Amino acid sequence: MNTSAVDQLFEQSKERSWRNASEDALLDFEFTASDPESLEGISHDPPPDEDPEIEFRYDMSGRGAKVRCVYCKYQNHYRGIVVRYPSGGRRLVGRDCALNHHGVEFEQHLNDFDAAIERQGYARRRRAFMAACAQIFREFQELKADPAVETHDRLMRQWRDGFLDLAPALINVARRDERLTITRKERDEAAEKLRKQRLGDRFEEERQKAKAAGKTWQIYRTVDEDLGSLGGALFFIGSVSVAKRLDAIQASVQQVFRTLSGDDLQSKQISGCFRKLAELRDELARELNRLDALAEAFDAGNLARIARWANEQAAEEIRLKAVLENRKAEPISARFTTDGQSISDRAGPRTVTVSLPTVYRPAPRTLLATLKAASSIDYEP
Ligand SMILES: [Zn+2]
C-alpha cells in the first residue's frame, strides 16, 4: 500500500479524520487533484466492500470533458471526489453519487472534508494577515504622527471652544444634511389686500375684533433663501479627536491580532476576526474622511457662506423683532468675517479667529490600503 499525502496528514491527528487535522498540516495540503484519472490505483472496477476515505476533490470543468464515475459507469461529472479504500485502490465518483451510495456517516466525512478546505482558506488568510502585523503597526504610528491629525484636532477644539453658538448651529445643519438657508418672515401685502377685498364692509369690524382678542392682524409669509451646501460636514459633527479615535481603532486591531495568534482556530473564529477587521477599516476610513473634511470646511467659499448665513440669520432676528414691536431696527454689524481660510467672531470683548494653516494636506490612505490588502483572500505577504 502506498503512503499518500493524506496518510502523512492524518498521522498527526488522533483518528483518520479531516476534522482533527491541525492547521499546520492543513496549510500546505493540496486538496485538488489536477489529474485524478492518473492517480495510482485508480480503476473503473466495482468498488471493494470497504469503507472509503475521501482523499481529494477534482474539478475538470476547465477541460470540457467529464470524468467517468464509478457508480454512473460513464463520464457523467466535471466535479467529484477521489476516494481511497483501505486495501489501496482508488475510485472517482461524483459527489451526489458518493452520498447516495455511502450513507450518513460518509456524508459527515464529506462535510468534514469541505470544512477542512474552508479552514485551509481561513488559515492561509490568517497567516498572511499575521505576516503584515509589523507593517500595519508601523503605518498606524506614521498616521498618528501625520501633521494633519494634530491640525484637525487643534482646529476642532478651537472651533468648539471659540464659536459657542455657531458650532452647535452648524452641527444641526450637518447632521440633518441640510443646506445653509436663511428663513425670512415678510409682510404678505398681497394676502392682506385679498383679505380686505373679501371682508369688504366688515373689514374694520373684524380688525377691531382681532385686536381685542390680542391676535396679530398683519399677515406674514416666510421666504427661504438658499446660500448653498455646507462643505466638510464631518468636521462640524466631530467631537472626539481623530488622535483618540485612531488610538481606539489601533487597540481594536491589536485585539484582533491577539485573537488570530491563537493555536488551531476554527473557521468561525477566523471569519469573525475578518468581519471585525472590515468594521475597523470602515471606522478608519471615517477618520481619514474627517481629515479630508477639514480642508472642505475651511475652503474660503465655504467659510464665506457660513459667515453670511450666521450674520443674516442674526440680522433677520433683530429686524423681525423690530417689525413686530413696530419700531426701527438698530444698526446691525457683521459679527462673523472671513479672510481666505480664516473666520472670526467679533461679538465678544475680543475677536476669536480660527484659521486653517496655508499648507494643509490630509493624511495619505496607506494604512487603509494595507489593511484591505492584507485581509483579502489572495494577499501574498
Ligand atoms: Zn456518478
Image (cartoon, helix red, strand yellow):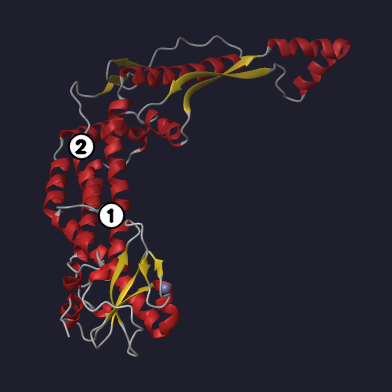
Q: For the point 40% across and 66% down, which residue is it?
A: 77
Q: In front: 95, or 237?
A: 95
Q: Which image quadrant is residue 18 in?
A: bottom left
Q: For the point 36% across and 21% down, which residue is it?
A: 302
Q: In front: 175, or 326?
A: 175
Q: Give the distance between the C-alpha atoms of the residues marked 2 and 1, in whole angstroms.
A: 22 Å
Q: Does the beta carbon at disc 1 come under 8 Å from ligand 1?
A: no
Residue 163 x %, y %:
34, 28
Residue at image mark 2: 149
Residue 283 x %, y %:
31, 47
Rendered image: mark on residue 208: none
Describe residue 199's horizontal placement relative to residue 349 as left or right: right
Describe residue 208's horizontal placement relative to residue 50 as left or right: right
For mark 2, give the secondary structure.
helix
Q: Which image quadrant is residue 68 in?
A: bottom left
Which quadrant does the N terminus fall into? bottom left
